[in-house]
Image (cartoon, rainbow, N blue to C red):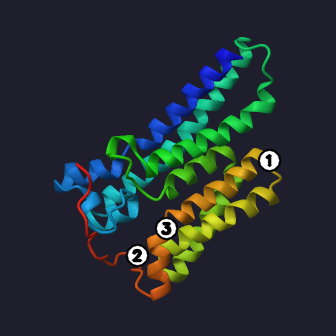
Amino acid sequence: MTLWLALNGLLLIGAYLLGSVPPGYWAGRLLKGIDIRAHGSGSTGATNVLRTVGNVPALVVLLVDILKGAVAIAAVRSFYTFADAHALIPSIDATIWLPWIVTLAGMAALLGHSKSVFLGFAGGKSVATSLGVLLAISWVVGLGTLAVFAMMLAVTRIVSLSSIAGAIAVSGFMLLTHQPLPYILFGLLGGVYVILRHRANIQRLLTGCEPRLGQAIPEVNSPPPS
């Protein structure tokens, strides 16, 4: 049991560190010589990269952020498959514990993206990384959530509102596709976390000041931590 706990702890740390990888920050530094946290919304996500760096870098950042979440889940599943095949921990029933560890790894990746250890615990809104997690957990749920996001974006042209709509829809898709309880909890907790990361956006939405896709946003007021 001690070995099992230690190995799972390492998996969760790995998921957090993977989520912490900041391609948006690197894009700003390498391509514009700027700290993206001091520009636009201050987020390191693809939307702020689009506003401050450009279209192609934003697409690359988006894909990498999605990949981070998917790889975190794939790593957990690969470990459990290997451990089960080689009877590394014979007293543990992988079929029972795997969904729970996947859920914890998904939350760790989201936390890493938004609170990156490499950026002084700053980061993005965790939307793209959560999509990667969802696609790895259930591609049906992931694509359904993406469809809600895309439809809302097509109608409103507001990324934050579309992200919030997707975050709300996740739990419904989890229930409709009869996912295990841990995955349903991920849909609920992950969705709430993404919404909470959009608090400033919600305030701007309520005052009618939230920019649409491609529009500029006022610069953040305080400089990022060094």
- Residue 55 in the image: x percent, y percent? 32, 63
Among numbered discs 3 and 2, the one appearing first in the sequence: 3
Name which residue lies at 69% across and 23% down. Answer: 81
Query: In the rendered image, which residue does mark 1 sit on?
Result: 181
Q: Is residue 149 above or below residue 158?
A: above
Query: In the rendered image, which residue does mark 2 sit on?
Result: 213
Query: In the rendered image, which residue does mark 3 sit on?
Result: 198
Q: Which type of secondary structure does the marked residue at label 2 adopt? A: loop
Question: Disc 2 residue type?
Answer: Leu
Question: Disc 1 residue type?
Answer: Leu
Q: CA distance from mark 1 to mark 3?
A: 26 Å
Among numbered discs 1 and 3, the one appearing first in the sequence: 1
Residue 85, image quadrant: top right
Q: For label 3, count other residues whose C-alpha is less than 10 Å away and answer few (under 14), some (14-19) or many (20+).
A: many
Left or right, 188 with reference to 91: left
Q: CA distance from mark 2 to mark 1?
A: 35 Å
Whether the residues at callouts 2 and 1 have beta carbons within 8 Å, the answer is no
Question: Disc 3 residue type?
Answer: His
Left or right, 14 with reference to 136: left
- Residue 169 in the image: x percent, y percent? 68, 66
Left or right, 130 with reference to 86: left
Q: Which type of secondary structure does the marked residue at label 3 adopt? A: loop
Q: Which type of secondary structure does the marked residue at label 1 adopt? A: helix
* Residue 33 appearing in the image: yes
Task: Point out the frontmost of discs 3 and 2.
Answer: 3
Q: Is residue 3 above or below residue 147?
A: above
Name which residue lies at 33% across and 46% down. Answer: 120
The foreground one among 95 and 31 is 95
Residue 188, image quadrant: bottom right
Name which residue lies at 81% across and 24% down. Answer: 93
Task: Point out the frontmost of discs 2 and 1.
Answer: 1
